[in-house]
Every structure is written in C-alpha cells, then in structure tokens.
Amino acid sequence: MPTAPDTAAVPRRGRPGYDRAQVLEVAVTLFNEQGYDATSVADLAAKLGLTKSALYHHFDSKEQLLALALDQALSELEGVLDQPAAHDGTPAERLAAVLRGAVHVLVDELPAVTLLLRVRGNSDVERAALERRRAFDHRVTALVAEAQSAGQLRADVDDAVATRLVFGMVNSLVEWYRPGGAVDVDRLAHDVVALTLDGLRTR
Amino acid sequence: MPTAPDTAAVPRRGRPGYDRAQVLEVAVTLFNEQGYDATSVADLAAKLGLTKSALYHHFDSKEQLLALALDQALSELEGVLDQPAAHDGTPAERLAAVLRGAVHVLVDELPAVTLLLRVRGNSDVERAALERRRAFDHRVTALVAEAQSAGQLRADVDDAVATRLVFGMVNSLVEWYRPGGAVDVDRLAHDVVALTLDGLRTR
C-alpha cells in the first residue's frame, strides 16, 4: 500500500507560509521516514507544496538542513552537561542529573536525536556530528570515572563500557517511546536512573 | 571515496562454489550495509560474482533470504528462553541467565540480529518477524513480573518498561561491539547483568 501523504504537513494552496524552523521540522521527519540519502530536495519541496526554488529561498542545500538538525540535537545534549545540576553534588548525583537530562532531551528533540543516532559518517557534516557525539561520550565517561574513583560507582565495569551501555539504554528510547503515550517522561527518566544506578534487584 | 569491494567475499573465477549458508551470509552483510530495500538481487549476484540465474539456483527470492536470516536470529533468541538455565533457579537468576544468553546470541549472530533490529514491518515477512520479537519480549516481561512478585526485583518500574530498557541496552551492542575487540563477550555479558540487575552504584 502506498504511503498516504501526511496532510498535516501539506500547506494550504497559494503562498505556503513556512518559516525556517517549520521547513527544518518537515525535513527531519522526512529524513527519518525514508533516510537522508534517499531523500531529494524535490521530495522535500513536494512534501511542503513548495517549488524547489522557493525551498532554496530558506536553505542553501539539503546538507544544510541535516547540519542544522544535528546541531540542534547535539547542542541540547551538550547543554545537559553544562546545566548546574551536572556540576553540583557528588559525582554519582551529577551522573544521575546528566542521565535524567539526556532522557528529557531525547524526548523533547525526538526527531533530531533520531536523525543523529542514524548518522554513519558518510560526509563531512556527518563526521563532524560523530566527533561531537564522541566528545560528549568522553565527558560522560570522565564523570563515570570520577564517581568510580570516589568509590560511588562499581569499578569492575570499565568506565567507557558503562557509558556506552547506559547510553545504549537511553538512546533505545527512540525505538519505542512516543510523547503523549502511557509513560510520562519524568517517570521514564526515573526508571532509567533507577535501572542504571541502582539496578532492578531489590536491596 | 568509493567503497572498495570486499575482496574476501569475491569468489575465485570459474565456478564459484558457494553453499546456501555462504550466500545467506553475504546477503545479510549486504542488506546491513546498504539496506534491504535498496539491495537488488543483481547487487547480490554481482557481490558474489554469480549470475542472477546461478543465484536463483540457491534461493527463490530476496525475501526468502531475509526470512531465513530473521528466522536464524529469532530462533537463537528464543533458544535462550528455552535453555535449562532459563528454567532453573529463582526468577532473578533465570532473568540473569536470559540476559547473558541474549548478549551471547547478539554477538554470535551479530549480522542477523542487526538485520532483525532494523526491520520495520514493510512486508509480511517483516511483520511476522516483529510478531515473534513481540512474543519474545512478552516472555521476558512475564519473567520480570514473576521476579517482582517474588520480591526479587523492584516493583516501582513497570515490567514491560523494564524489559524494553534492558533490551534497549542489550540491542545497542550492535552499534559498537565487534567480536575480537578489546571487550570479551563473557565480560560484556557480566557487565550487562551487573548494570541492569545490581546497578552501577556501590552498595
């Protein structure tokens, strides 16, 4: 069955009034649905009901849209490490705050983060995004190591492996979590922290 | 830079001697590299150095290859729930055994499991695979619920959410774990059980 057009994204006829943010939002949705590489500027123009030249009025290239979306996701994630709660308290408390913050970013920026997690390094823009992701991971790993040195986190799991496993859990939310569903985001953030820091087992 | 052909997969000239398992292995690798939908039978034949008709000697269709690969991944995962360790001991011990087994299957069957995790339900074959995945998840969720009822696992995290989060962590291994790398699979299975059941925090 062919995919029905998303009528919510189809503008009224005449002079569709999109701003840059709206064009970006529709672009990210389309990239996630059919893959960035498989999406042409013509596809995006058709989805928006714009001509290609009208679309180029907003953006220089498809890659610029990708770069903006990835920057949005990465800036929000980096913001989690720069928030006050990531600098106050014990290392374990700061890690808990970072995890809660990351869950919130993932839910708030679900389309952009989904796009980020699918990046494979096929262009300079993608490679730069992967580099920023790695830098983020390194900062979290350093926090895990600090908490291990302070005796707050178990030392028998490698700091980098622990970080990958914990963010594997956080990132997996893009596969099933949908805002407005049965599970509240604060509840979800609690569950992620409960599982990763304290474990499922009763004490 | 164009991707160099994988010479290891290119057969010797003349009458390339593939058996069905080898054809399937090359097919799964190609599906993972360039996407199932984007891979044609001609692509696969070219990769194998076979004519399309020689390839059809082994398999009826591209979809049959997909179905076989997904069945392989799912059968191994289901086998984890049927192993003796999944039926002996307390519910929490059985869950730990299931998680260790799932990590091993994921590592042993990395290409097939990677393919399974990317299935989105675009055909009857894909929908049937998703249905089997859901049935697997339900069996694990029932085990989590049993352990919660027995007081062994915390009850303040929903059983289905806990299962999704834990398997989110396990499944994320396909993104970074490579056999033969720095982290041994038994170590990795230990780390996953340690994190999900006992948590990172020292007691």
Image (cartoon, coloured by chain):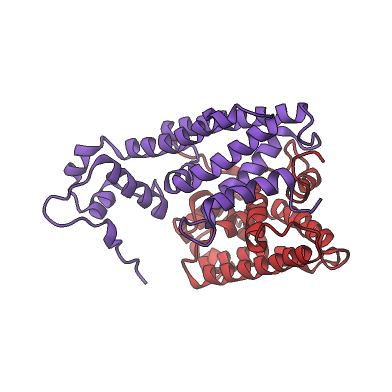
Chain colours: A red, B purple
What's the residue at 59%, 30% (across, down)?
A: B86
Seen in the image, is A36 located left or right of residue B64? right
**Image height check: is A85 above or below A200?**
below
Q: Position of residue B7 (x, y in %)?
A: 27, 62
Residue at the far left: name it: B14
Q: Kindly identify the residue that appears in the image at 49 percent across and 50 percent down.
A: A34
Q: Nearer the viewer, residue B116 or B91?
A: B91
Q: Position of residue A143 (x, y in %)?
A: 75, 66
| Any part of residue A49 in sight | no
Name which quarter of the figure residue B58 lies in: top left
Could you say which quadrant of the image residue B167 lies in?
A: top right
Q: Relative to A178, is B8 on the left or the right? A: left
Residue B188 at least partly seen: yes
Front-lying residue, B14 or B146: B146
Q: Quadrant of the N terminus of chain B?
A: bottom left
Q: How many marks?
A: 0
Would residue B87 be found to the left or right of residue B155 on screen? left
Using the image as rendered, state which of residue A84 and residue A163 is in the foreground.
Answer: A163
Q: Residue A13 location, x and y as percent?
A: 58, 50
Q: Which residue is painted at 76% across and 63% down in the image?
A: A148
Viewer-side residue, B114 vs B201: B201
Q: Residue furthest front?
A: B89
